[in-house]
């Protein structure tokens, strides 16, 4: 069947089950991707000009702000105990 979800990995150590290296490598790649290790490697592999760095950082900040705002709006719309927004129209 498989390991419990919490025992699949500890920190960045991945448990290999039944000599299934492909599954373990996919799990490790997903962990490293979520933690941003690949992004850090990509940025430090080559020299990045200061203007490119500023543009990238500003873009990441704007994207984070936008995502946070959209998640807040979606959460607000999807709440179940809200008052009818337009009374008398339903």
Image (tube, rainbow, N blue to C red):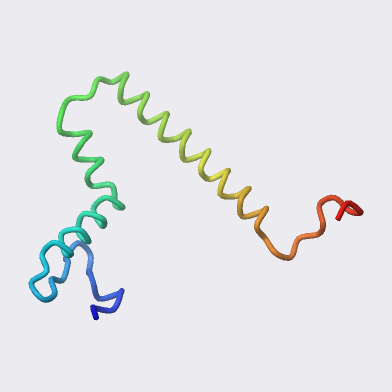
Q: Quadrant of the C terminus?
A: bottom right
Q: Quadrant of the N terminus?
A: bottom left
Q: Where is residue 6? Give x, y as percent.
A: 30, 74
Q: Where is residue 19? Give x, y as percent.
A: 7, 72
Question: In this view of the protein, which residue sits in the foreground, 75 or 47?
Answer: 75
Point out the residue furthest to the front here. Answer: 90
Q: Where is residue 8? Give x, y as percent.
A: 23, 72
Residue 83: image quadrant is: bottom right
Residue 69: image quadrant is: top right
At x 61%, y 51%, the residue is 74
Point out the residue furthest to the left here. Answer: 19
At x 63%, y 48%, the residue is 73
Question: In this view of the protein, which residue sits in the foreground, 17 or 33?
Answer: 17
Residue 10: image quadrant is: bottom left
At x 51%, y 43%, the residue is 67
Q: Where is residue 40? Give x, y as percent.
A: 23, 40
At x 92%, y 54%, the residue is 88
Horizontal arrangement in the rendering, residue 3 relative to residue 20 (left or right): right
């Amino acid at each position: 069947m498989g390991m419990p979800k919490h025992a699949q990995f500890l920190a960045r150590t991945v448990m290999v089950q039944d000599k299934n290296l492909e599954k373990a490598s996919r799990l490790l790649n997903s962990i490293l991707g979520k933690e941003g290790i690949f992004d850090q490697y990509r940025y430090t592999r080559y020299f990045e000009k200061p203007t490119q760095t500023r543009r990238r950082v500003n873009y990441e900040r704007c994207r984070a702000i936008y995502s946070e705002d959209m998640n807040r709006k979606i959460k607000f719309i999807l709440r179940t105990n809200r008052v009818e927004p337009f009374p008398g129209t339903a």
